[in-house]
Amino acid sequence: MAGVNALDPGELARLSSMTLRARVIVEGAFAGLHHNPNLGAAIEFAEHKEYSPGDEIRRIDWKVVARQDRYYVKQYEDETEMRTLLVLDASASMGYGRGPVSKLTYAGYLAAALAYLTARQGDPAGLMVYDGHLRRYLPPSSRGGHVRELLGVLEDVTPAGETQLASALERVADLAQRRSLVVVFSDLLDAEARETAPRTRESAVGPAAEALAQLALRGHDVVLFHVLDPDEIDLPFDDLTQFLAMEPGDTRNVVVDANELGASFRRESEAFRARWRQTCLQAGIEYRLVTTQEAPAQVLRTFIGGRRRKG
């Protein structure tokens, strides 16, 4: 499918279904590439299994054969089943977007593409959608029809409610009993507002940051996609502007001169992103900032390429 990787979010929005969008993103991400687009980590020895017809003879572990008097072959990490859990913030603030798509729609495109890719590899994927509470949970599965159900949920999700990222991640810790790839999509805009201790300029603190770190400590492979609208990085307005709070219960609606606010807004926005980047670095979590104007296929291509190089 020539030129697929050039499709921007607005062009993707015009496609007829989430299934088609996911396929287009994945095919665009790997157009012209010949390596296996596997989400797995390093190709490392994982375990032995008894030899069966069709296994490669070169994988036979002769030392084990000598001890056990049976033939065993080495099985490698990327040959074992990898479970993926996609965690999507669907709170009201994710509904913002002056461009063709909102942050929630854009995050949904990335989640759909990862689910589609995971299913194509034959690995189980699950989905958690949350705002102030757990809205929907589909356990990781590779059964027939599961990915269609998952993509259907992403097709229909709408922004509502406040953000409770910490409680969602605590549920992930309870539900993910086996080592999993946990991919979180959030704007993180309300996460620091719920802090229980003072934050520093160097790192984010509070329940959400702590819950992310705990997932990594439990051995999960954690990835955070920090999804923002370009307006939230570089305030583009230059006259009197009314800013409306999007989270329920927040009445902070103000009118300010955006031109005067611009410089301080950009400094605080940069510090906000830097805190989360440093927090993830310290916890061994992969942090990826994305904006809703980027082509999702290119974001996916860069993400998978980075994981392959890391492996």
Image: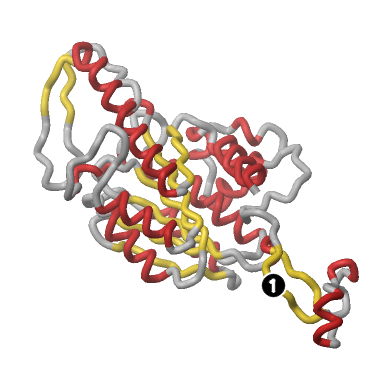
Q: Residue at x 52, y 50 (%)?
A: 17
The residue positioned farthest toward the bottom in the image shown: 69
Answer above or below: position of 77 versus 3. Answer: below
Q: Quadrant of residue 238?
A: top left
Taking 36 as reference, is 219 left or right? left
> Can you give x and y, in whole percent of width and height, for residue 169 in the image?
34, 59
Q: Nearer the viewer, residue 226 or 73?
A: 73
Residue 146, horizontal then vertical, whole percent:
54, 68
**Residue at image location 44% in from the left, 61% down from the top:** 127
* Res 106 quadrant in image: top left
Which amino acid type corresponds to the residue marked 1 in the rendered image? Answer: Glu
Work out which quarter of the rendered image holds the N terminus and state it.
top right
Residue positioned 68% across, 49% down in the render: 37
User: What percent of the width, then of the height, locates residue 207?
Assistant: 25, 53
114 to 74, vertically: above or below: above
Question: Label 1, on which residue?
Answer: 47
Mark 1, Cα crowd under 10 Å, few <14 / some 14-19 / many 20+, is few
In the displayed structure image, the side of residue 62 where residue 200 appears, left or right: left
Q: Residue 294, how many percent across, how many down?
A: 50, 31
Picture residue at 46% right of the left edge, 29% below the top: 293
Mark 1, secondary structure of its residue: strand
